[in-house]
Image (cartoon, rainbow, N blue to C red):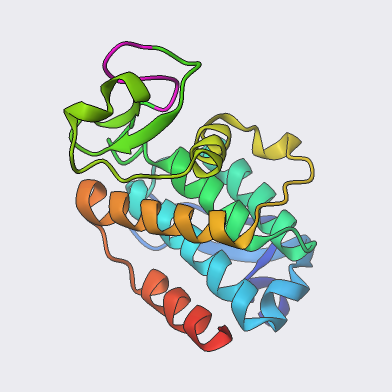
């Protein structure tokens, strides 16, 4: 069964699930492999980080069919050459709710307006519009393109994702923002994220 249980293998398996003791896989049926993720250390790092996030977000033995399908779609996109940074950002943003951190991204946290320029405010738990920038001297001063993708990624259906081209500056800004939210609000520091940061530094 070695080939059927390699990392980044998916398929149908037969086995026995025990609630109190070890569970067993007896055989793998119709299994396939994410070959590009397995062979590319950078793709591997993104995929591993996404899986670590989901593993941390949910207790063991809790069925999570929605997030299983989200993960399945994310890995398929990454394996097929879609920008892994974009896929990772989408998963990070949409998992915030699971971690109990749900920033207001629909409109202004103060007045609810949805059609003005926005910035991100940690103090107000999400976006604030230009009419209320003065309320938070420590707002993050994000550009509007970064705000646009932050809002878009929070609601996009990953299974219906089309072509998304995000420039490098915006990706850097999204990365800094999400790192800050996960560090300050979520409070997790995963080894897989540290490794991802290290290999991206090497890539640069």
Residue 28 vs residue 17: left or right?
Answer: right
Determine which quarter of the picture holds residue 133.
top left
Q: Which residue is drawn at 34% across and 74% down?
A: 191
Extreme residue toward the bottom, this view: 202
In the shown orientation, is residue 111 left or right of residue 92? Answer: left
**Vertical arrangement, residue 52 with respect to residue 110, above or below:** below
Quarter of the image that includes the N terminus:
bottom right
Q: Residue at x 52, y 79 (%)?
A: 200
In this view, the residue in front, 182 or 112, is 112
Which of the pair 26/158 is nearer the observer? Answer: 158
Q: Position of residue 57 (x, y in %)?
A: 35, 48
Q: Quadrant of residue 139?
A: top left
The picture places residue 15, in percent across and down from the top left corner, at: 59, 57
Magenta residues (range) = 105-112
Where in the figure is residue 102, as x and y percent of width and height?
Answer: 33, 31
Vertical relation: 44 (above or below) 19: below
Q: Which of 88 and 126 is in front in this view?
A: 126
């Amino acid at each position: 069964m070695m080939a059927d249980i390699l990392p980044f293998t998916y398929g149908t398996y037969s086995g026995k699930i025990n609630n109190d003791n070890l569970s067993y896989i007896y055989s793998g049926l119709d299994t396939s492999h994410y070959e590009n993720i397995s062979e590319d250390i950078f793709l591997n790092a993104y995929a591993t980080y996404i899986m670590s996030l989901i593993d941390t977000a949910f207790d063991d033995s809790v069925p999570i069919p929605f997030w299983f399908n989200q993960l399945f779609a994310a890995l398929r996109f990454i394996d097929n050459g879609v920008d892994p940074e974009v896929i990772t950002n989408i998963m990070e943003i949409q998992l915030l709710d699971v971690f109990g951190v749900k920033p207001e991204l629909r409109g202004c946290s103060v007045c609810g307006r949805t059609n003005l320029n926005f910035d991100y405010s940690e103090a107000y738990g999400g976006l604030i519009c230009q009419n209320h920038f003065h309320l938070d001297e420590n707002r993050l001063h994000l550009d509007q393109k970064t705000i646009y993708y932050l809002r878009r990624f929070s609601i996009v259906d990953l299974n219906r994702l089309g072509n998304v081209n995000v420039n490098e500056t915006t990706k850097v800004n999204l990365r800094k923002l999400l790192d800050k939210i996960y560090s300050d609000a979520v409070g997790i520091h995963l080894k897989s994220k540290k490794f991802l940061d290290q290999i991206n530094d090497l890539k640069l």
